[in-house]
Amino acid sequence: MSGSPPRRQINQEDVVCVSRFQCCDIDTTAGLGQMWWRTRKTCYQIVEHSWFESFIIFMILLSSGALAFEDIYIEQRRVVKISVLAYLAQFFPVSQVTTLRVLRTFRALRPLRAASRFAGIRVSLVSLVANTLGYSDLAAIKSLRTLRALRPLRALSRFEGMRVVVNALIGAIPSIMNVLLVCLIFWLIFSIMGVNLFAGKFGRCVNRTGFVYDASLINNRSECDAANDTSQHYWTKVKVNFDNVGAGYLALLQVATFKGWMDIMYAAVDSRAVEEQPIKEINLYMYLYFVIFIIFGSFFTLNLFIGVIIDNFNQQKRKISIKQNTVWIHVMNHIFMRDIFMTEEQKKYYNAMKKLGSKKPQKPIPRPLNDLQGFFFDLVGKQAFDIIIMVLILLNMITMMVETDEQSPQMEKILYYINLAFIVVFTIECSIKIMALRCYFFTVGWNIFDFVVVILSIVGIVLADIIEKYFVSPTLFRVIRLARIGRVLRLIRGAKGIRTLLFALMMSLPALFNIGLLLFLVMFIYAIFGMANFAYVKRQGGIDDMFNFETFGNSMLCLFQITTSAGWDNLLNPILNNSPEECDPHLPHTGTTVKGNCGNPSVGITFFVTYIIISFLIVVNMYIAIILENFSVATEESTEPLSEDDFEMFYEVWEKFDPEATQFMEYSKLSDFADSLLEPLRISKPNKIKLISMDLPMVSGDKIHCLDILFAFTKRVLGESGEMDALKQQMEEKFMISNPSKISYEPITTTLRRKQEEVSATIIQRCYRRHLVRRQLKAASYMYRQFTTPRHEHSEGEEGGEVIFGEDAPEKEGLIATMMKENYGSSLLGVERSSTISSTSSPPSYNSVTPSAPENLHPLAASTETADEGSAVREQSQAEADRTTETEP
């Protein structure tokens, strides 16, 4: 990097930069060009540093927070104004210039970012120069400095949550503008009607206290001005009126939001003619004007505006969720491209697989070896123990509800001892759990929560007076314990509706937090504007010592009130004061050079109307959109065959059969495991045939993976479908990739194939044994006839005792003939023809492959196994021989 820099290659970005900034087309090898190039390189290294972005975010937050100190009391805090605010005002434009000098990185030159950054630099530099030259109190400089309130907008690009919400809003702007245009056109009709009906008729003669004179005393404006010798009364108008179309729009906005609309309606009903004193309800038919507008302009048009905002926000949310970099979305995009092209059955299967993918087996807490600890371990693991604790919590809450401000000392003492007893019980519960679970107690969030509540309750009893005096009431700690009831809801099957609501709320929390950040940002910006323009407005109507724009905190309170659409008309009325009768434009204020307490009607109307549209009609209704969307999702999931609780229950039962979390289960335990599950995954006994038919993959050792079991059980609940096979295969692959902790394995067989092999082996054994029996019977019958007939004589050359098979023998060679010779030789007649077939001569058995039930074997097959069963074989042989003899001619 030392020495002269090389001539840079011209690329497309340089061409764009040079075409826009001719000064950039210079020689960077010598002179000022080289200095400029080194400066840019240094700035580039600074901006691209990993800490620079975090540092800029910190400075944005710090400089934005510094704006909150510029209230009406800033002159009284000279140290803050001179040291902190001055240095921050100098640093911020320097950091902006440093960023923009990196012309090599054209990210700073994108239109929107460039506009905001150049605007921020201009405002900061002008304010810096004005402060240096002593012109900071000029009205133009003050007005320009109010634009610094837009500085927090730079945080939008730094925080992911707000950026997502803002992008959704930007995407919904076309639809919002369309509906807003429809509202303006529809309201224009009523505004023109209001101008024709009420223009100039909202005037009245009042005294300094606001009392309206009766028409019998003062009939019109001329009489009011003529009688104003002592300046005790004057002619004024209702601040919100129908004198022109713009004022009519403001009046209709108050009517549509139901804030201050009663005063406008009464003024219209009491109106007579231009510049005439009103008379009560002299124009009753004007009620119809407001009734009709409320029906069509508020109930219909305004709610249509809200509905379109919610619908478009949900559409943007779905688009963003599709683009998220998640495994399951990629699976669906890979298979079906878009969610809308999925059938209902595919969506149902996909939702189940998505829930399944977020779970995995957990290694259970080992049972302690100590007998006492083991007893407590079994106790705390029972569901009845949790239910008893929840009942005690409810009883504790009931005792706290009994407390009143006027209770007697005896009642107070009784409640104190009851609460003390509950604390002892909960302390014992916590101690038992710690003794049973040991160090594993602090691995569960709910246990830590219980432990903290117990500690705070004990401290609250010991130091009740001190804590209540300097902090909060100890009762609050006991109330927090009520949150534990949420743990038992999942154990109650009848509380499905409550679980659905809680699930919708939990799903909404991240999005609600992002919207809350955006709302806070909007309120922050408007609070700075409010302090800059309405800090010295006369305290009147809704503006008092608490709700005003004098300080940042009070401004936030006012804006929160406007956000809820509660009484914003009372806050607007003092800002509309601009006449000498209503305010004093020359009133001095202590500690500042600002004079007057009048408002600015045009700025005030713009301020309130834009804030109401942004906050009340858009941002706040995003909360409704999020709640509706997630409640719809939660309701759909509650109606689905499988829920998150079902999969959690599966793995809870799995822990009992796989305590080492090997992710595998022996095939022999599968039947008991399936029967131990809860509905709808449960397969009650007898269930072996159902489990075999699932065709579960098996590895060596006759073990099955938990994922295969869960897939099969899920498929059983959702139903069989041929189109699900491809989806299941894709999801299995993606699931194994996204969960590297899952043990990879290679199945060698399946449950169905293993059963088929067992049945096939049994059938082969049975058939072969029957074949042997039939051959033995034939041979035995032949031998019987040979030895019992008188024609039986030894042939010449035949050795004594040797069996010779004749031409009519059923078999002369082979297994049966050999066995007959060995077993029935010369000793055949000596043993009374009752020798049995040796078990050692039986054919090979398949018992090593699979055992067969004795009742499934042919009775004659047992003759090859034991000598005691030889008599049965002989009886069968005798019967067969008799039948053969009877059939012979």
Image (cartoon, rainbow, N blue to C red):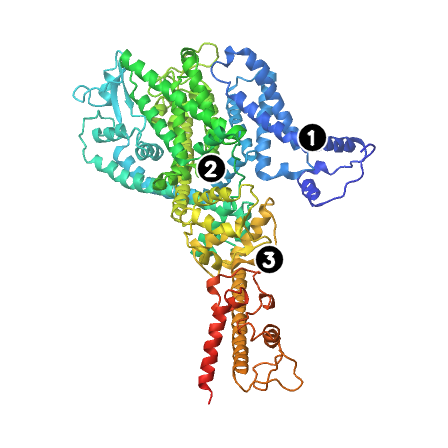
Labels 1 & 2 near each other (Cβ < 8 A): no
Disc 1 marks a residue whose amino acid type is Ile
State the CA–CA distance, disc 1 to disc 2: 34 Å
Q: Which residue is mark 1?
A: 46
Q: Amino acid at mark 2?
A: Ala
Residue 206 occupies which quadrant of the picture? top left
Give residue 618's position: percent from left, percent from top. 41, 37
Q: Contact (CB < 8 A) between labels 2 and 3?
A: no
Which sits in the foreground, 797 or 568?
797
Q: Secondary structure at mark 3?
A: loop
| Residue 521 visible somewhere in the drawing | no
**Alpha-carbon neighbours of circle 2 within 10 Å: few (<14), some, or many (≥20)?**
some
Image coords of residue 231 (percent x, y):
28, 13
Looking at the image, which residue is at 60% across and 16% down? 133
Picture coordinates of residue 302, whole percent (x, y): 34, 39
Residue 38 location in percent, x, y? 76, 31
Give the distance between the C-alpha atoms of the residues marked 2 and 3, in whole angstroms. 47 Å
Q: Tell me the amino acid under the disc marked 3.
A: Ile
In the image, residue 683 above or below residue 151: below
Residue 511, numbered label: 2
